[in-house]
């Protein structure tokens, strides 16, 4: 028979909850001993040493294996800390804090302050300040999205209403009674808590916190920042640490200040973290040098700067502001590769053969001095003969070798055949007051492609070096399409008379052949979108499974440590592997620990993408709010049972057309065709169709637009055998203009699809 102490230890080892059967099995007790165990447990219960709930035993103050918890704070290292939701403080004492851990390969929203999460308790030790560690199973619906909105003061004074910021909550306003405003002014972004509800009337709420006013410039992104819990103010200790940083000198570094490296970036870029140079090699190839700002020299492991950078994971780029990963003292000053200023860098020298393939490479920790700061269009103009005062002295010795090296590298790139989707990105140009001036599609230049291809080569070289040195790293990985997505894509393409090989081992070249087939046709935008949706999402991982989209076996982000934490980890790995400093990756960093980091920053990346997309939606909805009744040319970008998603041609604005407003017919969702098809008429509205729409509703705060469809669809034989036999274009790519069908003006709930414009800094950033 086990002793009382042994039984208590076993119960505690099972995360505090266990049954009599498990105890008997663990100690191999006989039937007679089970009777003794029953008495022993009764004694422990009477002593208050264990508690019984629904025939389960647990040690008072211990946590069950799975617990529902609220995230309430961060510890000194910036880690999230939660407490259990159900906890009897009088009987069990103070609720134990739980260190929140995001699992590797995590999916779904990022956990943040005030979120409610389901945790699996994975370890615990009373010696630690936070005795329990909980791995996130699921982030439940974020409380901040349910309780955040815009306060609108009542005209008569006292109280007001809350306009929800979430599209799913549209039409569900909350009433704030007089005295519950918490000094909120009209137009303030606030968090609220629900009060006791009445049987009739609007739900009532009390303002908990004022987050900022939306009546000022650069305010629209404030909604997304708070809704997604993006840290946008640096703690004092981080700012002080950044301000105390001193300029790195040439000591312990190679002096490359005479090499004419240049930066080529967007015209509005404030941080310049990559510089390039190329020179012809004697064997017909080129030597390409890529120098990247040495952020690891300033942001050391375990410092306040490092902890804050990990929490943020990456910079977030909004049209009206940037929320940086690092303070400006680091990102825009000490690590920005300004012209004619000494800057520390980590450089890779790439030896390229005449066939464009990389022959060898070497990494160097250097001190450099940029010979010029160029914009993409400026570099392109110079190489085409339109120079200015800055580019004129750089054309022969710097720009022409760079473009010649790119032409060489492009041969290998074309032979490799990465996935070549044509998805133009729109950029929002703002007025001084923060409102939308216009939306443009920047021209894709060889200058963009040059920088992108050189950055990819540098990223590959970093992964290869760390693998060779057996140093753990964070890979940028991209899995191939799942079998289910491939099957759905194959069925859809079949409706367009396009074949996809029946094999599980698809390659990017399979998709490229299809894209070439539809290039310069009406089908091209449709096929590009559908192939994009069939792809998996790229992420970070400490274990390599390749990058499908780029068609590369190994790939790591190395080229943007100012704005991505993954790149900083790779820099530290190179410093450690090459023995070029004491500020490299700590020796206790393992594949397992980096896996946790990779999972966390994958989540922050998805958080940033969602916040950027929602902000674009809101800005464009504000821009179009005074154009109710206007008509636009658009393309159907999605079809669901609820209705159609469309994107306007000029602005790229996304909006929704409820199925109930399509006409006097019942429209069913055809999954294979990705279309809505009328039961009686056979009228079909399909993804990719060009249509004319009328704006009927705009909800700027939520970023939602609702449209009415004015175009007639193509026709297919109805599923029940009825309807017209005439068809539209054989491929079904475009509907024909026609009169609005009766009933199309019916009201429907506003909604929105996904937005398109991406980050301000182009290149391989999110590949």
Image: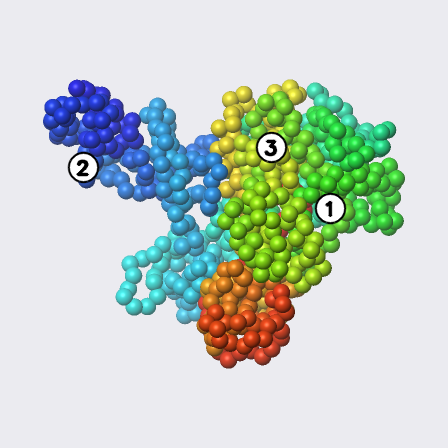
Q: Which quadrant holds the C terminus?
A: top right
What residue is disc 3 on?
A: 568
**Residue 445 screen position, x and y as percent:** 76, 50
Q: Secondary structure at mark 1?
A: helix
Q: Which quadrant holds the N terminus?
A: top left
**Residue at (53, 64) in percent of width and height:** 675
Q: Secondary structure at mark 3?
A: helix
| Crowd class of label 2 (few under 14; some 14 to 19; many from 20; radius 10 Å) | few
Res. 535 in view: no
**Which circle marks residue 448 in the picture?**
1
In the rendered image, the vertical position of residue 404 relative to residue 526, given as above or below: above
**Residue at (28, 64) in percent of width and height:** 198
**Residue 326 screen position, x and y as percent:** 59, 38
**Residue at (46, 58) in percent of width and height:** 166
What residue is disc 2 on?
A: 55
* Numbered disc in front, either 1 or 3: 1
663 relative to 142 in the view: left or right: right
Tell me which colouring the rendered structure shows. rainbow
**Residue at (67, 41) in percent of width and height:** 271
82 relative to 725 in the view: left or right: left
């Amino acid at each position: 028979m086990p002793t009382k102490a042994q039984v208590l230890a076993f119960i505690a080892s099972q995360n505090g909850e266990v049954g009599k059967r498990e105890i008997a099995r663990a100690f191999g007790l006989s039937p007679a001993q089970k009777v003794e165990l029953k008495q022993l447990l009764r004694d422990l219960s009477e002593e208050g040493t264990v508690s019984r709930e629904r025939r389960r035993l647990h040690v008072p103050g211990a946590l069950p294996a799975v617990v529902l918890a609220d995230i309430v704070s961060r510890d000194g290292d910036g880690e999230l800390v939660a407490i259990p939701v159900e906890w009897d403080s009088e009987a069990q004492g103070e609720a134990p804090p739980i260190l929140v851990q995001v699992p590797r390969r995590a999916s779904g929203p990022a956990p943040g302050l005030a979120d409610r999460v389901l945790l699996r308790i994975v370890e615990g030790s009373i010696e630690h300040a936070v005795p329990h560690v909980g791995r996130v199973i699921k982030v439940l619906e974020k409380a901040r999205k349910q309780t955040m909105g815009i306060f609108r003061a009542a005209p008569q004074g006292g109280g007001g209403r809350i306009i929800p910021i979430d599209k799913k909550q549209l039409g569900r306003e909350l009433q704030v009674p007089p005295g519950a405003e918490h000094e909120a002014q009209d137009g303030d972004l606030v968090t609220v808590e629900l009060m006791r509800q009445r049987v009739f009337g609007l739900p009532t709420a009390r303002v908990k916190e004022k987050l900022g006013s939306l009546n000022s410039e650069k305010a629209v992104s404030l909604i997304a920042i708070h809704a997604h819990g993006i840290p946008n103010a640096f703690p004092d200790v981080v700012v002080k640490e950044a301000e105390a940083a001193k300029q790195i000198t040439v000591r312990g570094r190679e002096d490359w200040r005479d090499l004419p490296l240049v930066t080529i970036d967007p015209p509005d870029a404030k941080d310049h973290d990559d510089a390039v140079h190329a020179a012809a090699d004697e064997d017909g190839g080129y030597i390409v040098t890529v120098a990247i700002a040495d952020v690891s020299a300033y942001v050391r492991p375990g410092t306040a700067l490092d902890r804050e950078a990990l929490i943020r994971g990456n910079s977030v780029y909004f049209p009206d502001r940037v929320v940086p990963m690092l303070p400006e003292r680091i990102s825009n000053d000490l690590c920005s590769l300004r012209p004619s200023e000494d800057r520390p860098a980590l450089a890779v020298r790439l030896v390229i053969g005449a066939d464009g393939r990389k022959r060898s490479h070497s990494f160097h920790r250097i001190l450099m001095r940029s010979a010029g700061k160029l914009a993409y269009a400026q570099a392109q103009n110079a190489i085409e003969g339109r120079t200015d005062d800055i580019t004129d002295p750089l054309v022969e010795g710097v720009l022409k070798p760079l473009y010649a090296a790119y032409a060489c590298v492009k041969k290998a790139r074309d032979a490799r055949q990465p996935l070549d989707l044509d998805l133009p990105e729109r950029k929002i140009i703002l007025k001084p007051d923060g409102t939308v001036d216009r939306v443009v599609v920047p021209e894709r230049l060889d200058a963009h492609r040059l920088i992108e291809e050189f950055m990819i080569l540098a990223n590959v070289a970093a992964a290869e070096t760390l693998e060779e040195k057996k140093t753990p790293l964070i890979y940028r990985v991209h899995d191939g399409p799942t079998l289910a997505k491939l099957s759905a894509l194959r069925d859809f393409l079949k409706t367009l008379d396009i074949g996809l090989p029946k094999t599980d081992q698809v390659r990017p070249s399979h998709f490229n052949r299809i894209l070439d087939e539809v290039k310069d046709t009406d089908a091209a935008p449709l096929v590009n979108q559908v192939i994009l949706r069939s792809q998996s999402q790229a992420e970070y991982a400490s274990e390599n499974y390749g990058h499908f989209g780029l068609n590369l076996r190994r790939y790591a982000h190395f080229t943007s440590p100012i704005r991505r934490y993954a790149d900083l980890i790779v820099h530290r790995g190179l410093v450690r592997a090459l023995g070029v400093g004491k500020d490299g990756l700590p020796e206790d960093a393992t594949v397992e620990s980096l896996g946790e980091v990779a999972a966390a920053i994958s989540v922050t990346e998805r958080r940033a993408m969602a916040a950027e997309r929602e902000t674009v939606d809101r800005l464009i909805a504000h821009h179009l709010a005074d154009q109710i009744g206007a008509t636009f040319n658009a393309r159907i970008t999605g079809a669901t049972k609820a209705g159609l998603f469309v994107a306007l041609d000029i602005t790229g604005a996304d909006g929704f057309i409820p199925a109930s407003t399509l006409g006097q017919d019942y429209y069913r969702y055809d999954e294979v065709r990705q279309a809505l098809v009328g039961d009686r008429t056979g009228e079909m509205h399909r993804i990719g169709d060009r249509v004319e729409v009328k704006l009927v509703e705009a909800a700027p705060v939520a970023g939602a637009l609702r449209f009415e469809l004015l175009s007639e669809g193509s026709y297919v034989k109805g599923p029940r055998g009825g309807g017209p036999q005439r068809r539209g274009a054989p491929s079904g790519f475009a509907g024909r203009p026609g009169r609005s069908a009766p009933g199309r003006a019916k009201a429907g709930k506003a909604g929105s699809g996904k937005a398109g414009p991406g980050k301000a800094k182009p290149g391989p950033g999110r590949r």
